Amino acid sequence: MARKMLIDGELGQTNDGSETQFEYDLFVIGAGSGGVRAARFSANSGAKVGICELPYHPISSEVIGGVGGTCVIRGCVPKKILVYGAAFRGEIEDARNYGWELNENVDFNWKKLLQKKTDEINRLNGIYKRLLSNAGVKLFEGEGKIVGPHEVEITQLDGTKLCYSAKHILIATGSRAQRPPIPGQELGITSDEALSLEELPKRAVVLGGGYIAVEFASIWRGLGATVDLLFRRELPLRGFDDEMRAVVARNLEGRGINLHPRTNIKEVIKTEGGVKVITDHGEELVADVVLFATGRTPNSKRLNLKAVGVEVDGTGAVKVDEYSQTNIPSIWAVGDVTNRMNLTPVALMEGTFFANTVFGGKPSKPDYSNIPYAVFCIPPLSVVGHSEEQAIEQANGDILVFTSSFNPMKNTISGRQEKSVMKLVVDAETDKVLGASMCGPDAPEIMQGIAVALKCGATKAQFDSTVGVHPSAAEEFVTMRSVTRRVAAGSKPKTNL
């Protein structure tokens, strides 16, 4: 995008250079992770900042949302609470072999966990509001839309409309769960509703192969439900390392989840006993709940972007340059609404760098290299850097692959048959570690430290020279000495999984 960047040094001027007076230096639409971070950091740099967000509710829609956004209210945080709850089932089973004398029947109270989850997101919603207030950011409750390059209109719950001018406008409205276009799709739910079900399902069908699908499959199975997981590929988690995808699939099956690869839903039908799912193979599954975990779309359609001239792509994602600026110099966007890398810490990074660029006097481009992330299935998967397939595709020379598969020390006593798997992908010529993966207990906690090493450009020799913490699973990352395989330059990675 070849255009003039409008930054703080041009305060008091519109895009055409004429003098004007704005009510706000920055107005943010959307008070999720990225929007709140950008608002706070901009205010800390001296900017006068306003922000608007929809009224609070755990289940979002076009007219309800809440300060804290998807991650805090209906995403990462409540999901992780339920994962913790579900993981205790396996812990209780394993405890018996460690000498704990437990009754055969261990009761679980879903409503108690649900209330604890709700209490926590209510608490965090309040914390986010206080963070804004303490930073001097003015919060408006209502739906925001852009009515001009420097104008935002807010429609409050009672229908009252407020209009404010701002030198800069930041779009941070995130994304929304979507439903597939199949007959009966209204009988299913999305992840929003899945986090707030009044009753725990005894039978669940999950459609999707991404991280949301495998996480909810793990949660419901861990809490005692019968779970069928349907996905279009041979393995779940498309885009992740193929070897690690196979490990996750084995673990899901080992925990009792019924996998249906290369399967889609043809129709959902209401029945007396719940809902009936008919697959494209003619199979019929009856469930209490059908979860559509089939992706999310940028939440941009009600922002009036077309009228203002802001460019979006075919999915509705706001187009931005490497500084998060749109084609309209006074309008910016961060987070999932841009559909770059849709992770909460990435939205925080983008919000921080926006504030540095526009109000901090430090133009900064977000760096998307070596970002670690995790799938909170049970046990979890965590990765950083390139998968083996990505490394092969981008390599100029040979790739060395190091792997370790072992029974965690805890399992030797509990008797659980579930391997932890670790993997390093290394450039054969430079010895630089290009990627790391782990599936097993504590994988996300371990991978955060590995991410620091990759960010610093660590070599395999430096991994090898690092003393391990013993006894721990993490030490395997510094004791993998033997090459599992060498992949020659020019090899073609598998793409049909």
Image: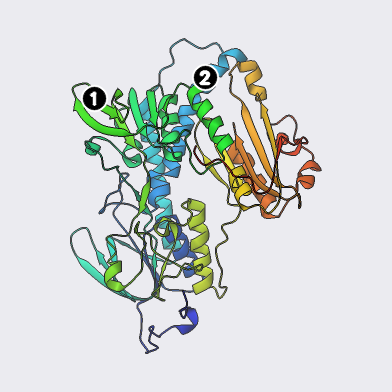
Seen as rendered, the residue at the extreme right is: 465
Percent across and percent down for residue 343 are: 48, 51
Q: Position of residue 9 (x, y in %)?
A: 49, 82
Q: Residue at x 29, y 31 (%)?
A: 198
Placement of 83 over or under 254, stated as above or below: below
**The residue under label 1 is which amino acid type?**
Gly
Is 56 situated above or below 199? below
Question: Is residue 19 among what the camera can see?
Answer: yes
Would residue 119 appear left or right of 400 to someone viewing this image?
Answer: left
Image x and y of residue 443, in percent: 60, 37
Give 380 or 490, whichever is nearer the viewer.
490
Q: Are marks 2 and 1 in contact (CB under 8 Å)?
A: no
Q: Which residue is mark 1?
A: 274
Residue indicated by mark 2: 92
Q: Residue at x 38, y 26 (%)?
A: 228
Q: How is the image coloured?
A: rainbow
Left or right: residue 489 versus residue 346 is right
**Among the 4 quarters of the image, the one containing residue 328:** bottom left
